[in-house]
């Protein structure tokens, strides 16, 4: 994640918590059958996704759009449909790996 000496803002850390929750849920579901994984995603991941989207929209209104955090929030919102696709098919993996890779998070969320 962040390079030594770099720091994430507390707001960016809040956003990362949602991502980490989603990754944690996916790790817990890794050995489940596809049908069970689908069901458990709606039970466990859907509320986290809903809260994350609400948080993104709220923070977007409170953040300067050209700041690193503002750009990261806009990026997430612009790619939200791609993120949610994994909820529709139990065989798909969460797109956070591509959407919010550690290098991209570092680039978009670090205070410069």
Image (cartoon, rainbow, N blue to C red):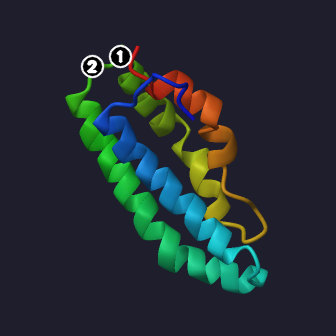
Residue 89's quadrant in the figure?
A: bottom right
Question: Under tag 2, what secondary structure?
Answer: loop
Residue 27's quadrant in the figure?
A: bottom right
Q: Measured along the vertical axis of the image, is residue 28 above or below residue 1?
A: below
Picture mark count = 2
Q: Position of residue 79 (x, y in %)?
A: 56, 38
Q: Residue at x 57, y 69 (%)?
A: 25
Q: Residue furthest front?
A: 4
Q: Measured along the vertical axis of the image, is residue 46 above or below residue 40?
A: above
Please state, as top left, top right, bottom left or bottom right, where the C terminus lies in the image.
Answer: top left
Q: Position of residue 58 (x, y in %)?
A: 25, 42
Q: Residue at x 55, y 25 (%)?
A: 3
Q: Position of residue 70 (x, y in %)?
A: 36, 24
Question: Under tag 1, what secondary structure?
Answer: loop
Query: CA separation, marks 2 and 1?
Result: 5 Å
Quick check: marks 2 and 1 in contact, CB under 8 Å? yes
Q: Position of residue 95 (x, y in %)?
A: 66, 49
Query: Is 51 placed left or right of 45 in the picture?
Result: left
Q: Badge 1, how many Cα within 10 Å: few under 14, some, many 20+?
A: some
Q: Residue at x 33, y 19 (%)?
A: 65
| Residue under label 1 | 67
Query: Is 80 placed left or right of 98 in the picture?
Result: left
């Amino acid at each position: 994640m962040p390079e030594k000496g770099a720091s994430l803002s507390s707001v960016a850390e809040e956003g990362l918590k949602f991502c980490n929750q989603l990754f944690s849920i996916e790790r817990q579901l890794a050995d489940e059958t596809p049908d069970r994984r689908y069901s458990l995603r709606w039970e466990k991941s859907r509320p986290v996704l809903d809260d994350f989207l609400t948080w993104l929209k709220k923070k977007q209104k409170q953040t300067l759009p050209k700041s690193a955090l503002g750009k990261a929030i806009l990026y997430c919102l612009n790619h939200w449909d791609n993120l949610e696709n994994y909820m529709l098919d139990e065989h798909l993996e969460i797109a956070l790996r591509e959407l919010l890779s550690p290098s991209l998070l570092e680039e978009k969320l670090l205070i410069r």
